[in-house]
Image (cartoon, helix red, strand yellow):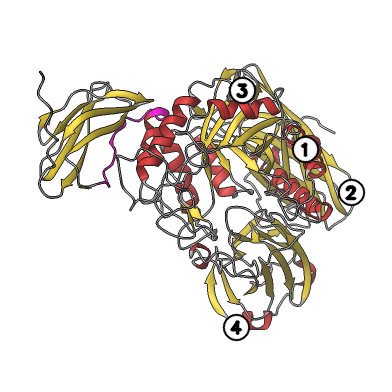
Amino acid sequence: MTRPLPKSLAAFALAPLFAYSATRVDVWRYSEVSAEAAVAGETVAIPHTWNATDIQAGRGRDDMGRDGYRRAPSWYATQLPTPTPGKRVFVRFGAVSSVAEVSLNGHKLGTHRGPATAFAFELTPHLSPGGANTLLVKADNTWRSDVAPLSGDFGIPGGIYRAVELLEKPPVCISPLVLGSRGVSVTTLRADKTRAELKVVAHLDRAANAAAEVAFRLLDAKGAPVATAAASAPAGVGATSVEVKLSLDSPHLWNGLKDPYLYTLETSLAATDGSKDTQKLKVGLRTLTFDKDKGAFLNGEAYPLRGVNRHQDREGRAWAVTEEQEREDAALIREIGANAVRAAHYPHSEVFLDECDRLGLLVWAEAPLIDTVGQNPAELGANAELQLREMMAQQRHHACVFCWSLFNEIGQREGGGKNPLSVVRRLNDVAHAVDPSRPTAGATNRAWKELNSIADLMAYNGYPGWYGGGKGGHDAVFKSFRASAPDRPWGISEYGAGASLSHQDDSVMKGPKPAGKWHPEAWQSRVHEHALASIERMPQAWGTFVWNMADFASPWRTEGERDGINAKGLVTYDRRTRKDAFFLYKANWSDAPVLHLLARRDSARKSADTVVRYYSNLADVRVTLNGAALPAGVAYAPSAYIIGNVRLRPGKNTVEAAARTKDGKSVTDAVEWVLEGPAKQPAPRPSAR
């Protein structure tokens, strides 16, 4: 029952918070042999994976079809501190890949099946008050027919690769046991300039037979309450929940990059046995709608989503990325000027989503149903549904998350794979029932009417200019996919091209073989130039997402300059180098001044005749070659310019570009090209007669 805060609970809500105690469990012992060996094994720090380097080594698959990186069980053990008397103790794992079995002092606590969602167990009944407490985790990334994903163009590193928390809570508490969530569920019922309404559910867990009062306060950015409500739970033992509605007039809306305003939802519990507990979540109030002919609208205003795809993968770390690296990825996406990111192809971390909330980046959240449902669609579908439910429970309070994506390139693969339609329909029904406030989505690579008509939003993975002919334009491709489900809003979920930094030829005129070893960076730029031009002709495209923000490990690829890497990123695997195409998008999407000369890595030239290309969002760009002015650049793609008929001299040549911002600040860039040997002379022209 919802009602205003009673005086006793109002006083508690205004008092200092009695938050649960959370301790990070970062140091573990590790073994690839056995549980017993792990207790005295090598010391490792969380986040950890045993595939930090072999997954990017490009070993492909062996003759038995097994992946060329270690997919097997490993064991982790740690000694827990002495518990506080009278407290309940829980352990929460941010993610363990891909199946985890957890035990304490020899007592099995449970199993979690899925590589990228959080889960928790209670330790209290099996803790020794004065003795040693050994927490043991068996992590296993062995391929299984009943655990999604079954396949994909990426690896599944094994290990405890997100944070582990030890939680101390009172006997009656806000539950950490509901699908790995923080125990509070938020649904936006309405959010516009005049009014906002939220449905909030608090999940409680009672080890004592006590009644509880739960207070809910929505606090503005300054900490002042703007909406309050309270509910009571009768005395009892076990799990229960309470629900309220919070309303406020003239809300401050979360408005993407322009104004990512966040409120704090504070949930406070006080029980008759003396238990006190709190939980805080950041929430944003916004409305995002989609029209099949007009695209996306944020808070009633046109807001085409222009973004990138992202994998949680780093060179030398695989999935065991640090929280600092998670934030660095979000900062790179923000730097490029994107307003959205597709979190491919599995749930991404709490840290990354928190940063997207803060920066104003909308997030496509995706369940890991990829390529096929295999030979056991019932079992695989049940696991995919569990992972979808966990993802929604853990992420639904995030303002940045705008859809629940059900699948990527799902189909019936030759030699295996049943019809996936019943599985996808089931996931669609579940998502709508659990969270009716967000649309479902799907990413497809086939014009399959039955499949493409299930989710609310559709987008396609298409690579003109890379896989297939053309230079990168999407006009015909978009039209073809849209015809398969004309009543659905359509976008582009993946597009792009590979680029190896050591492969340089700015004069390239034809796309290379995608499976070949030659992946010139310049061709990636040409593909994205054509793609961006065609996207600007598609106002009906609700969202477009570059594949990919950064290079990532794909263990079975043997292409480009380095095996085991998908090099379609706009930045390199280590995030140290922004490729030329990065600046094309930054010039078009970002408000920051951009002036970037292309082909800086194509420094050794064999021909004197060349062109100068640059990307810029500035007016009156002046370019010189060896100090001599060149003609003005001619636009050939959005924010892309070319100067033709440029002739280099033997030896070193310096190209410099300069412009000024509207407020008079100077912006410059320069590249050096070295012409090898004497300049080639043009063939003599026949005399006119």
Question: Three-letter amino acid code at disc 4?
Answer: Ala
Which disc number belongs to residue 40?
A: 4
The answer to whether mark 2 and mark 3 are in CB contact below 8 A is no
Question: Circle 3 is placed at which residue position?
Answer: 251
From what the image shows, is residue 206 above or below residue 456? below
Q: Earlier in the sequence, mark 1 or mark 3?
A: 3
Question: Three-letter amino acid code at disc 3?
Answer: Pro
Question: Circle 1 is placed at which residue position?
Answer: 428
State whether the magenta stretch is mostly helix, strand or loop: loop
Mark 4 vs mark 2, foreground winner is 4
Q: CA distance from mark 4 to mark 2?
A: 45 Å
The answer to whether mark 4 and mark 1 are in CB contact below 8 A is no
Q: Earlier in the sequence, mark 4 or mark 1?
A: 4
Question: Counting other residues with Cα less than 10 Å from the Cα at mark 2, is it few (<14), some (14-19), or many (20 or more)?
Answer: few
Which disc number belongs to residue 235?
A: 2
**Is 174 positioned to the left or the right of 322 in the image?**
right
Q: Position of residue 676 (x, y in %)?
A: 15, 49
**Is 136 positioned to the left or the right of 314 in the image?**
right
Mark 1 vs mark 2, foreground winner is 1
State the residue at coordinates (67%, 68%). Answer: 140
The C terminus lies in which quarter of the figure?
Answer: top left
Give the camera-side residue of 166 and 625. Answer: 625
Q: CA distance from mark 1 to mark 3?
A: 31 Å
Magenta region, residue range: 588-602
Question: Three-letter amino acid code at disc 1?
Answer: Asn
Which disc number belongs to residue 463?
A: none
Mark 3 vs mark 4, foreground winner is 4
